[in-house]
Image: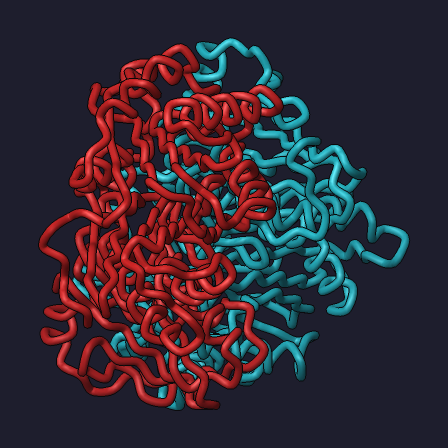
Chain colours: A red, B cyan
Amino acid sequence: MSKPLPLLSIKGFRVGTTDAGLRAWFGKTPSPDLTLVVADKPCAVAGVFTTNKVKAAPVLLDQKRLASNPESIRGVLVNTASANACTGQEGMQNAEETAALAAKQIGCLPQQILVMSTGIIGVQLPMDQMRAGIPAVYGALGAENWPDAAKAIMTTDTRHKIHAIKSNGYTMLGIAKGAGMIAPDMATMLSLIVTDAKISAELLQDALQQAVRASFNRIVVDGDMSTNDTVLALANGASGVEINEEQFPKFLVDLAQVCQVLARKVVEDGEGATKFITIRITGARFETDAKAIAHAIATSALVKTAFYGGDANWGRILAAAGRAPTKSFNAGKVSLWYNELCLVENGVPTNYNQARANAIAAGKEIEVRLELGIGWRNYEVWTCDFSHDYVSINGHYRT
Amino acid sequence: MSKPLPLLSIKGFRVGTTDAGLRAWFGKTPSPDLTLVVADKPCAVAGVFTTNKVKAAPVLLDQKRLASNPESIRGVLVNTASANACTGQEGMQNAEETAALAAKQIGCLPQQILVMSTGIIGVQLPMDQMRAGIPAVYGALGAENWPDAAKAIMTTDTRHKIHAIKSNGYTMLGIAKGAGMIAPDMATMLSLIVTDAKISAELLQDALQQAVRASFNRIVVDGDMSTNDTVLALANGASGVEINEEQFPKFLVDLAQVCQVLARKVVEDGEGATKFITIRITGARFETDAKAIAHAIATSALVKTAFYGGDANWGRILAAAGRAPTKSFNAGKVSLWYNELCLVENGVPTNYNQARANAIAAGKEIEVRLELGIGWRNYEVWTCDFSHDYVSINGHYRT
């Protein structure tokens, strides 16, 4: 592990936040809701986006930018309150206009600005507030405002999520917001990672995809997938340390570490979550089978409510595994562990200690391992339990 | 619609229930927990079973019986409290023994008895209680005890589910238990339908499969699928009315009607349910796409909690549709209705009345229609909302 960075700044990047009145416009308690990240020099950029077929305007805009202009990004504008999704032509025009307004402040081209939005689907950006907010947030730029930025991008999150490292002469810092609507194959709704390493957009994209596969794509809160999920990485080269093919493996480990720490924080802060649960599937014939089973277990409302209740009701885990769409599965070869305690061996309950099993299920951190006994492929996901608070938060998000 | 039957008996069938102490054994409030259905003469039988790869012992036993002996069934023994699933060799032996004990009481062969179990997974049947309970339940047989049977098979159900009809000289009666762990492609955990029509096992199986496809397979409570789901139909021919190829369509309609009424009751009594929601997907290019989208919406925790909160947060419906694994989907062609109110047209929100939308979302019965605009295939599922009570019920089912 590279050591955590005490000073929360990355050379050549500035960040600011402001209360532009976006939350207030939608009847929420006001707090900073608009964030601008500015790089002094053009950056290489990489992005991983939601695979949802309903994509928000900022996702479509950023994908266009990355395709045409991946080596000269100067800024990222992030707003909460409106997700700018399902907003049609007008939503796309608004995304373009906000990018152009930020570019004007910075003194660059609109194509050098990326945008991210999170919040309610199907409502337009409050453009009066955005137009007034963009000069204000530009005026608030500073090198050490990253914790404020991590707070300003929150929606139903209860804690801000930030992680920074120093490694081999370069630094790297990430912020994320998550909470609900998180599923494998795209995770935290928004994450932004900046580094002063010098790396090409092509290598950075390669690294980000691998890092996301090993982190954000492993987390499950409620099985839903957002229209807005985006992970962006910006590299400005200010450290002078160049990442070529040789240094690439070390850089990849660093990036994956930042993504994993943020991904874990997202699960720990899952809507209403009280527990962190690792679902590890081993002994599968195919990795796709292991993944399908891990996902079926991690999204099962019955499994997640049982963990919330601290109930070692492992039958629900086998039932979820059995309904997963797998090519190869044999109920008579399956074994199951909660932490170190073996509950099921070859499909039949062991003579385990029920009090010990309940004590594990009642804990804050649980590893569930399901050994399929028919091969050597593995897959792991991280999830949380399903509580009364999840229902409260999501039953009344808009009101 | 054939008219509901006032008298709750079917010629040639008797049914009894007893408190065999099964619920008490697992620390639950005692109430009748063992049910026996007896046919005076051998019956034709049909069955539809869970597609879960983890199958309970009674499912495996019944499948064996149906394969070898579909024209001479004399009885069905149903227990609650233990699901007899994930119980290995011993569980199968216990299932066989209870069938043999019931057969001895009735005076038939063990192969003429079917068994059904519902309850906790991974615990053996309490055999002392079963051995004492079987003679007791045989002693309690009567023609009109069907409502008691519908009650005795309940687990987390809050209401018993029963429906009977008289049609063309024959009668038909069904009972069901459901509540949680219900998903398309197998629905209520247990349902048993008896009729005094005379029909071959082959035709009955054909009719039952079609009826289940149009009823139990359309309902979704929590997206999970039980290890025990079973629908059985028994026909004893006591009415003398023979169902041949010509009468088959009418018989099919009757059977489908009984199954649909029971399936609706299961959704209405879904764990913690406060609303009945119809999800209708129209205009798909392929039926598999319509089905995948209907299922994604009906199992989305975000959609279901929004309905619980009476919040017309339709963005979550589009987001769920967008993540469904479809071959053909165009976000710009999608239109959405809540009842008669059009919220989205061609991917963009209409200028709808928000108060009206919330009033619909706050109602007890809601139809959501999503028109995909790219074809003419349809699919419909029935589901319920997701409440605090669902979490309470499932967080502490065993304790």
Between A112 and B327, the one nearer to me in the picture: A112
Residue B139 visible in the shown view: no
Give residue B369's position: percent from left, percent from top: 62, 30
Seen at 73% across and 69% down, the residue is B201
Residue A356 horizontal side relative to residue B31, left or right? left
Q: Is residue A274 above or below residue A156?
A: below
Residue B278 visible in the shown view: yes
Q: Is residue A63 above or below residue A19?
A: below
Between B166 and B296, the one nearer to me in the picture: B296
Residue A143's image quarter?
Answer: top left
Give residue B363's position: percent from left, percent from top: 44, 21
Q: Give the number of callouts.
A: 0
Between B347 and B70, the one nearer to me in the picture: B347
Q: Dividing the image into 4 quarters, which one contains the C terminus of chain B?
A: bottom left
Residue B331 horizontal side relative to residue A211, left or right? right
Residue A251 horizontal side relative to residue A359, left or right? right
Between B293 and B159, the one nearer to me in the picture: B293
Of all residues shown, which one is farthest toward the front? A240
Seen at 73% across and 40% down, the residue is B378
Give residue B166's position: percent from left, percent from top: 67, 41
Seen at 66% across and 66% down, the residue is B46
Residue B81's image quarter?
Answer: bottom left
Q: Dividing the image into 4 quarters, which one contains the N terminus of chain B?
A: top right
Of all residues shown, which one is farthest toward the right? B246
Seen at 23% across and 84% down, the residue is A342
Give residue A46's position: percent from left, percent from top: 46, 53
Q: Is residue B303 above or below residue A204?
A: above
